[in-house]
Image (cartoon, helix red, strand yellow):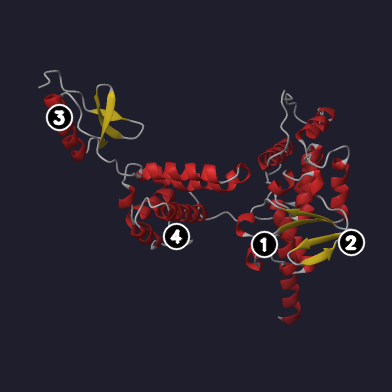
Amino acid sequence: MNSSKPPKYCHHKATDRACVYIHGQPVYLGKYNSPESRERYRQVVDEYLRTGNAPPPRAERLTVAMLVARYLAFLEVSHPKKRKSNIYLRALASTKVLVKTHASTPADEFGPKALKQCIQQLANDSYSITTIQQSVGGIKRLFRWAVSEELLRVEVSQAIDCVEAPRAGSLDARPARKVYPAPEESVTAVLPLLTGPIRAMVELMLLTGARPAELTGLRVGQIQQQGKLTIGYKPIDLGQVWAVNLIEHKNAAKGLSRCLLFGPRAQEVIRPFLENKCPTDYIFKPADGWTDFKKRSTILTKIRVPKRIRERYDPETIRKGVQRACDTLGIPRWFPYQLRHNAATRLVAEFGWDTARIVLGHSSVDMTRDYAEDDLLKAVEAMRQAG
């Protein structure tokens, strides 16, 4: 029999589990300060005092926190870095509430009531109804993935799928913020304060409805300036329009195509950035932006030029540049993605819903309707004549 002092009951704060150290190695006992962990502690200590060794470890149950960690590791490995911001970070945001409220809960015991507790917690944390709906969808995808990997029984996922995402007005949550087109006078005022490449991308977003990430990743050799463009089975004569058939884009995983089209005005914006560059070079390079910045340093706020300049821009850099210019002018901030709404509204008014849908790269007109603002002037004129 071992006559040494019994080891202490300890708290492993990182995982909120109880543990006891035997020969310097932790033996985990379950949730800290729970009756089950206390009982397990007595069993481990009795075995240690009797034999001098810890009992064989139990098969550890998969907790929600462990499941979330495995899921995020899977997404990080299985998706390219270019799409990491879209998929990995969205999953990270959706599962954050799970770790906050049910980290130590066994994953196979997480059910509809637990999901409803997560929904209420998100509402208490002042998240908008849209964010809550997206988080519910992300949690359901997590558990469906766990079933596909044979980590959980299918009944667990099926039970969670029975919980509907809350609708607007059904929960005391902050209403979703409506995204409107950026005020055109603010866009015009901001343009002179932006460096050359960022100013060009802002102008292209306004003209073409392109997403920021679609422009930051453009290379010189991707632009087709003449001939015929083949998407699907039918070749299309481009005429005087330039085209880029994007391989990597937001909806590439769904098998959808995405083509950027640049008319005469957009071509004039791009043309200066194509000079003296190889086909593999990015069209809009931060080095060009710093060169333009140093020429106009008396206009813009002085910023120290970094020793190492990145090869390409990212959408966040465009956003920061626009909002810094707004702050300099003392006008309300707007963000670059709003320019896609400006383009949608103009395209619908001039060419109709279906043409706007194709230019914006939407799979349905319903999505385009979320971007384009209704032309109330037409309704006013109709009622002046008819009502």
Residue positioned 71% across, 54% down in the render: 340
Per the image, label 1 sits on a secondary structure element best described as loop
Which residue does the numbered mark 2 point to in the structure image?
A: 239
Per the image, label 3 sits on a secondary structure element best described as helix
Q: Neighbour class for label 1 at 10 Å: few (<14), some, many (≥20)?
A: some
Residue 75 lies, in percent from the top left, at 51, 45
Residue at the top extreme?
4
Residue positioned 43% across, 43% down in the render: 70
Which residue does the numbered mark 4 point to in the structure image?
A: 165
Residue 352 lies, in percent from the top left, at 75, 69
Q: CA distance from mark 2 to mark 1?
A: 24 Å
Residue 174 to residue 54: above or below: below
Query: In the rendering, which numbered label is found on residue 47?
Result: 3
Residue at the bottom extreme?
386
Mark found first going from the N terminus, 4 or 2: 4
Residue 145 lies, in percent from the top left, at 44, 53
Mark found first going from the N terminus, 3 or 4: 3
Per the image, label 4 sits on a secondary structure element best described as loop
Which residue does the numbered mark 1 point to in the structure image?
A: 362
Report the front residue among 346 and 188. 346
Q: Neighbour class for label 2 at 10 Å: few (<14), some, many (≥20)?
A: few
Circle 4 or circle 1, nearest the eye: 1
Q: Amino acid at mark 3?
A: Glu
Q: CA distance from mark 4 to mark 2?
A: 48 Å
